[in-house]
Amino acid sequence: MMAKATEAGSVFDVAIAGGGYVGLSLALALKKGDALMKVVVIDPKPMEILGKDPRASAIAAAAGLMLEQLGVWSQIKDQAQPINEMIVTDSKLRDVVRPVFLTFGGETPDGEPFAHMMPNGAMLPALYEAARDLGVEFAAPDSASTFRSTPDQVRVELASGKAITTKLLVAADGVRSKLRDLAGIRTNHWDYGQSGIVTTVKHERPHNGRAEEHFLPAGPFAILPLTGNRSSLVWTERTDDAKRLVESDEFTFELELERRFGHHLGKLELDGARNAYPLGLTLARDFIKPRFALAGDAAHGIHPIAGQGLNMGFKDAAALAEVLVEARRLGQDVGSFDVLERYQRWRRFDAFQMGVVTDVLNRLFSNDNDILRAARSFGLGVVDRMPGLKSKFIKEAAGFAGPAPKLLSGEPI
């Protein structure tokens, strides 16, 4: 619904294309920081169906602090599963025993879990309702079909035939961002020839909050704990094999699942749909253009091997909101290139660095080379015996490494 977006003379401060977790958290953060800022979110799906998203996401501790500042964490925390421990193995699919080379305790220095697993069907509606209650407007279902920038504003043409005028347009419309292409922003991209199978399973025995990442020749197989005796799977396979598995009958799928999952949690049962998503690395060469900015997967699509994609998106939203709110307080134009350049300097190198790290990890671990396997096993074993280095990895996984936006440090903008 969009009550005011097409009224004569109505000009928004920020229009956000994309009503996922990045777009919604950005809109909410902007209104929390400046109640007078006029914000609209454009999305092709009705916002009312957000609660039907069957997926789950790993929410790092820093992102949890951000959600708390945005006023939604207390509403959804009871549906989250803390990750109390994580183990890493490296083996071949046919190996009967998978030695554990690396273990992580699940706590940050302040005693909080470094991450929670959160159902998207709880998180997304909470963000939407909080944003709506603060006065964020929504053009949904609708989509931005094209836009035209002038020195002072942007006119966004919608698929419905309506139009929006705004000082800044933010594209948070995913890794295949149409608006990024329309803005003329080029990307560095390559396909891994892998797809990630995502599904949920029930199991007989409790997981006790333990996450597992098994490095197998085709790619990582991650078991992520959910509330109850359930786990979310992110299962990487070569693209042709993933397609075959998703399209196979339930018996075949469960048989292949057991080969990778093992029997340590007892009998397995599928608890939801299975879907496969192609995996690749996409890094935008620029995060901004005049009166235009990228956020989330539109700026950087990385491999899920480190589980950091969503948390990088939250960091984009927190950083951009902080830059824009502070610019407004100084009487600056939120769409000016100088203001947007602060956001780009803050986020582009960090995104590039994480993209390189996940790319190297995927290439190092997604193979069946015995020499590399021996080197990996040695390296993981060394890390496991170095508490200081492990603490650094936990800090990174929790989202506390590097200069963090205020929201990710638990502070208001």
Image: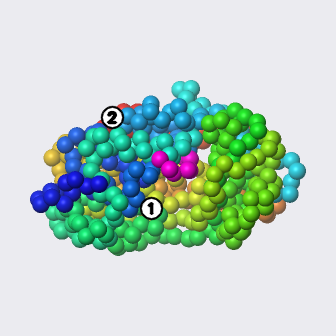
Q: Quadrant of residue 241?
A: bottom right
Q: Label 1 amino acid?
A: Gly
Task: Report which residue position mark 2 lands on.
Answer: 412
Q: Which residues are magenta?
A: 51-57
Which quadrant of the rendered structure holds the C terminus?
A: top left
Say whether residue 347 is left or right of residue 381.
left
The numbered mark at residue 174 is 1
Q: Answer with left or right where residue 291 lies relative to residue 105.
A: left
* Residue 380 shows in this picture: no
Which x, y percent locates residue 188?
A: 48, 70
Q: Residue furthest top?
A: 111
Say which quarter of the image contains residue 403.
Answer: top left
Cα distance between the residues tagged 1 and 2:
27 Å
Q: Is 129 contained in the magenta span? A: no
Badge 2: residue crowd in 10 Å (few <14, some 14–19, many ≥20): some
Residue at 39% in and 69% down? 178
Task: Please give the name of the residue rendered at 37% of the width and 37% of the height, measured from the top-left corner.
Answer: 70
Disc 1 is placed on an element classified as loop
Nearer to us in this view, 81 or 26 = 81
Q: Residue at x 44, y 61 (%)?
A: 174
Q: Is residue 192 above or below residue 207?
A: below
Taking depth in this image into account, of 309 and 124 the one nearest to the observer is 124
The disc, 1 or 2, on the residue closer to the chain's N-terminal end is 1
**Residue type beneath disc 2:** Pro
Against 44, residue 395 (above or below) is: above
Q: Position of residue 55 (x, y in %)?
A: 56, 50
Residue drawn at x 28%, y 60% as measured from the top left: 169
